[in-house]
């Protein structure tokens, strides 16, 4: 996709969807480690499955309105059970084979790890982390990932997707914090018209600064919410 001034910014169109309401959401639990996140017991609730179906139907409507053929669609998702479950439901609505080449799991799209002092504890603790993010997005919660840490792996995920796909419409199925951060860096990189850097990694690095990253909560998504990014 060409940006302003003819600068090639990204080769694909990107949409995001946050996983549908999950069992951890219903239980009020922080489940952010890979080990726990992959457990089947933390999949979607029945309401979450409905949300994922609605997201898939909304996405399908957009594809039809924009005359985007299904063969040009790619679904990239976090390996956690709640995101895998969401991606499976969306793929089913779109009539895309989940086991086929159009669907790809990317570890770098996993949930932000909030650290052992938050893991499997009440999600009432999230505001503490977001307050820390606003103060210093390079500061890690004890044993966990900072916003800047998540930016590093999301940059890897983007480069991976940009390398694998050209001219596709990519749906990224991930989690609240990673998707807020994903939108933050892509919007900032897109708006950074003063940058003479053409490659994606350099453009993101240029906006990987506290004043940008500390604002990621502005891009918050509800469970099952679908949104266009670039």
Image (tube, rainbow, N blue to C red):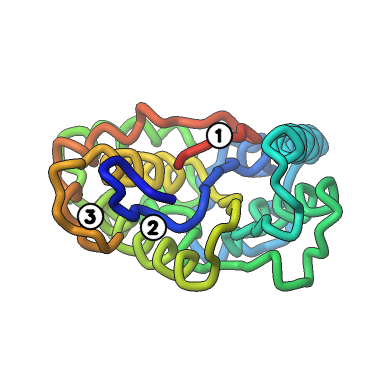
Query: Looking at this view, is 41 or 112 the one in front?
Result: 112
x 72%, y 41%: residue: 67
| Residue 132 locus on image (x, y percent) | 22, 38
Label of residue 227 in the image:
1
x 28%, y 49%: residue: 147
CA distance separating discs 3 and 1: 22 Å
The quarter holding residue 127 reads top left
| Residue 172 locus on image (x, y percent) | 56, 51
The mark total stands at: 3
Q: Nearer the viewer, mark 3 or mark 1?
A: 3
Residue at mark 3: 203
| Up-down relation of residue 202 to residue 3 (above or below) | below
| Residue 171 locus on image (x, y percent) | 60, 50
Q: Which of the two discs, 2 and 1, labels the residue nearer the N terminus? A: 2
- SS class, disc 2: loop
Q: Are marks 3 and 1 in contact (CB under 8 Å)?
A: no
Q: Residues within 10 Å of mark 1 (few under 14, many from 20)?
A: some
| Up-down relation of residue 65 to residue 19 (above or below) | above
Q: Residue furthest front?
A: 6
Query: Looking at this view, is 138 or 165 the one in front?
Result: 165
Residue 6 lies left or right of residue 194; in this view the side is right
The quarter holding residue 101 reads bottom right
Q: Which of the two discs, 3 and 1, labels the residue nearer the N terminus? A: 3
Say whether residue 102 is visible.
yes
Location of the C terminus (image quadrant) = top left
Residue at mark 2: 116
Q: Nearer the viewer, mark 3 or mark 2?
A: 3
CA distance separating discs 3 and 2: 33 Å
Query: Looking at this view, is 34 or 175 the one in front?
Result: 175
| Residue 156 locus on image (x, y percent) | 37, 67
Q: Nearer the viewer, mark 2 or mark 1?
A: 1
């Amino acid at each position: 996709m060409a940006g302003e001034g003819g600068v090639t910014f990204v080769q694909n169109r990107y949409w995001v969807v946050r996983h549908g309401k999950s069992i951890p959401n219903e239980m009020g639990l922080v489940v952010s480690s890979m080990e726990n996140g992959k457990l089947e017991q933390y999949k979607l609730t029945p309401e979450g499955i409905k949300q994922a179906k609605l997201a898939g139907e909304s996405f399908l409507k957009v594809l039809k309105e924009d005359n985007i053929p299904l063969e040009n669609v790619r679904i990239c998702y976090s390996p956690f059970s709640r995101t895998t479950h969401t991606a499976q439901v969306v793929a089913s609505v779109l009539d895309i084979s989940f086991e086929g080449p159009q669907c790809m799991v990317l570890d770098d799209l996993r949930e932000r790890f909030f650290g052992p002092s938050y893991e499997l504890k009440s999600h009432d603790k999230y505001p503490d982390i977001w307050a820390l993010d606003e103060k210093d997005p390079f500061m890690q919660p004890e044993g966990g990932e900072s916003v800047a840490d998540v930016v590093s792996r999301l940059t890897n995920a983007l480069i991976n997707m940009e390398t694998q796909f050209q001219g596709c419409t990519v749906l990224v199925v991930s989690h609240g914090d990673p998707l807020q951060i994903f939108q933050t860096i892509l919007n900032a990189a897109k708006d950074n018209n003063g940058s003479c850097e053409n490659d994606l990694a350099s453009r993101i690095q240029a906006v990987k600064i506290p004043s940008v990253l500390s604002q990621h909560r502005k891009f918050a998504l509800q469970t099952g919410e679908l949104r266009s990014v670039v």
